[in-house]
Image (cartoon, rainbow, N blue to C red):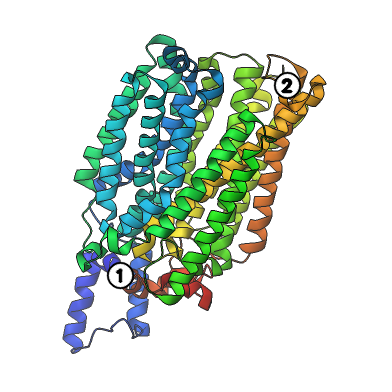
């Protein structure tokens, strides 16, 4: 890259001096290839000097830590509130049948507004939306514990999810545009990917300690403080964009497809609501399947509407349907949904196993998940090195296999009194290795697949697929668990009841759900082996194409040379993504 030449001043100055002495030469433009002598010199410099960072090293670290904080805080907020749900229910007199809405309100708002915020961020600038989203999370979270009733409390939990939907996808967009392809970008995406599992672990730990020794309200206080820190840090470390669509005259009113926004937001809202309530009121309740059909119809109309806008060119669609013509891109989104339905579902039922079946305290349950946090930090470093060395399909296959093995360990008929260190510890380690291997590959692939103008939308899309996959997978797993418990107890599904400590029926239900999670993991693995086999190395930049990559990275409408190795830019269908 050009920056890599600047990173080696002695070599570059000597080279320039030699060129001046031997006579004037015109600098090749973006359409001309570098001569063999020049290319050889660039290759030597690249091999000896890594690509230069876009900013100072300290600012790059601060930038990555800030945007990774959005992913960390999103998971921490969800997981920590789950831990203190009983305390919230007692304080606000919320019955058990409605207590889950404290969590569901956040997840619904987060999942439904991802695509809309992604499009708005690509118009007004990712930095601005990230800052406002983080500030909104801080303000609504600090108000939440002082609200006097259930309705107001759930409403503000939804408003928190609205803020998270703004800063999480823009974080991916910021990393995608701030770092050119290379080692620094691999580090950045690996650290971002580690934020989610680490947030879950520290959310458990923080909430467990606070619930044990202080008021549950401090959980929201800590989350608000962290959100405020991220907001202030973002103001100082995230660089303002050099150019936005808004500067070209684009506005939310004129540039956002509001018909599409209403269709997809309503469709996802109805779908997630039906899936959330189905396990509470029963799947045989007439309005549950009706809502699911309505949701699918709304999403189908949204897809047709986006296709119409893209063909006619009357208005920019929220999501270009043509991007899914690229088989690997479509496969990546499917892998995202399957993988996180497997991994996310396993985490939920592992918590059930320790807290509801074994009757462990909050602290004891949290300690059993602690190895995932430690291993997550180690994986972030290791994976950042492997992204530029190991073929993408091998890393994705390894990550999916690790999570599938974890599900098998928790589904197999291992005596529940067996030592934690004999099998569960191994499962915890494998689970986070799998998540921290597959997740950075998927988001880095998405970043490479889309032009810079659509980076925030790409972050929204990949998160939406994971959110929807997790919701659908958890709904099916819970239905399986309930059916198995009812069968074991000899009662109807409606009378199955809740889990009981050290009961065989409860254990059988948890194991059945984990067999389902294993099947999801194996399906995801099969998609990887079929769709990504033969793909290149996601984090590698061919040395001979250094200058070409640098020139093309500044042109969002053109594929980078490094992408050709992944098969992103080989087909006409793939090129449509950036048009």
Residue position marked by numbered label 2 in the rendering: 495
298 in relation to 483, above or below: below
Q: Secondary structure at mark 1?
A: loop
* Residue 430 appears anywhere in the view: no
Looking at the image, which residue is at 73% across and 21% down?
495
Residue position marked by numbered label 1 in the rendering: 554
Q: Select label 1 or label 2 by which is in front.
A: 2
Q: Is residue 39 left or right of residue 523?
A: left
Q: Which mark is residue 538?
A: none
Residue 109 in the image, given as x and y percentages of width and height: 43, 40
Residue 273 in the image, given as x and y percentages of width and height: 53, 39
90 in relation to 420, above or below: above
Looking at the image, which residue is at 46% across and 44% down?
111
Residue 147 in the image, given as x and y percentages of width and height: 33, 21
Residue 500 in the image, given as x and y percentages of width and height: 68, 15
Q: Nearer the viewer, residue 61 or 22?
A: 61
Q: State which quadrant residue 424 falls in.
A: top right
Q: Nearer the viewer, residue 477 or 6?
A: 477
Quarter of the image with the C terminus is bottom left
CB within 8 Å, label 1 to label 2: no
325 in relation to 232, above or below: below
Report the residue that reaches farthest toward the front.
Answer: 286
């Amino acid at each position: 890259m050009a920056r890599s030449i600047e990173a080696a001043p002695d070599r570059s100055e000597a080279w320039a001096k030699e060129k001046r002495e031997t006579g004037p030469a015109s600098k090749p433009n973006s359409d001309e290839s570098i001569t063999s002598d020049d290319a050889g010199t660039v290759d030597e410099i690249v091999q000896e000097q890594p690509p230069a960072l876009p900013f100072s090293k300290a600012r790059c670290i601060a930038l990555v830590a800030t945007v990774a904080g959005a992913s960390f805080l999103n998971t921490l907020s969800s997981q920590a509130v789950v831990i203190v749900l009983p305390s919230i229910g007692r304080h606000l007199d919320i019955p058990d049948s409605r207590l889950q809405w404290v969590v569901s309100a956040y997840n619904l708002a987060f999942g439904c507004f991802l695509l809309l915020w992604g499009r708005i961020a690509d118009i007004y600038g990712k930095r601005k939306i990230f800052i406002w989203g983080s500030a909104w999370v801080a303000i609504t979270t600090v108000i939440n514990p002082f609200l006097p009733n259930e309705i107001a409390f759930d409403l503000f939990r939804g408003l928190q999810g609205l803020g998270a939907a703004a800063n999480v996808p823009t974080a991916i967009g910021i990393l995608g545009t701030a770092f050119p392809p290379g080692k620094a970008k691999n580090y950045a995406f690996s650290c971002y990917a580690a934020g989610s599992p680490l947030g879950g672990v520290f959310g458990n730990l923080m909430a467990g300690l606070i619930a044990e020794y202080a008021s549950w309200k401090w959980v929201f206080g800590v989350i608000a403080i962290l959100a405020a820190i991220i907001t202030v840090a973002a103001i100082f470390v995230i660089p303002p964009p050099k150019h936005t669509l808004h500067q070209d005259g684009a506005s939310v009113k004129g540039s956002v497809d509001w018909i599409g926004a209403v269709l997809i937001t309503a469709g996802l809202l109805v779908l997630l609501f039906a899936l959330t309530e189905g396990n509470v009121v029963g799947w045989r309740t007439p309005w549950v399947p009706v809502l699911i059909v309505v949701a699918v119809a709304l999403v189908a109309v949204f897809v047709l509407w986006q296709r119409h806008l893209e063909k006619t060119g009357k208005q920019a669609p929220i999501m270009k349907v043509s991007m899914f013509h690229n088989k690997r891109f479509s496969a990546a989104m499917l892998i995202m949904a399957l993988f996180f339905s497997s991994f996310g579902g396993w985490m939920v039922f592992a918590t059930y196993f320790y807290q509801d079946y074994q009757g462990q305290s909050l602290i004891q349950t949290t300690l059993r998940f602690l190895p995932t946090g430690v291993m997550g930090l180690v994986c972030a470093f290791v994976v950042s090195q492997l992204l530029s060395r190991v073929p993408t399909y091998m890393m994705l296959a390894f990550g999916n296999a690790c999570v599938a093995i974890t599900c098998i360990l928790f589904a197999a008929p291992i005596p529940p009194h067996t030592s934690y260190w004999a099998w569960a510890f191994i499962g915890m380690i494998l689970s986070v290795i799998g998540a921290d291997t597959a997740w950075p590959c998927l988001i880095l692939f998405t970043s490479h697949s889309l032009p810079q103008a659509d980076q925030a939308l790409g972050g929204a899309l990949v998160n939406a697929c994971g959110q929807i996959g997790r919701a659908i997978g958890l709904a099916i797993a819970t239905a399986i668990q309930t059916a198995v418990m009812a069968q074991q107890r000899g009662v109807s599904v409606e009378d199955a009841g809740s889990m009981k400590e050290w009961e065989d029926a409860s254990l059988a239900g948890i194991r059945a759900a984990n067999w389902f999670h294993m099947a999801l993991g194996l399906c995801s693995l099969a998609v990887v082996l079929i769709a990504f086999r033969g793909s290149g190395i996601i984090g590698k930049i061919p040395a001979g194409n250094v200058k070409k990559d640098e020139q093309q990275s500044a042109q969002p409408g053109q594929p980078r040379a490094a992408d050709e190795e992944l098969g992103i830019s080989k087909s006409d269908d793939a090129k449509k993504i950036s048009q």
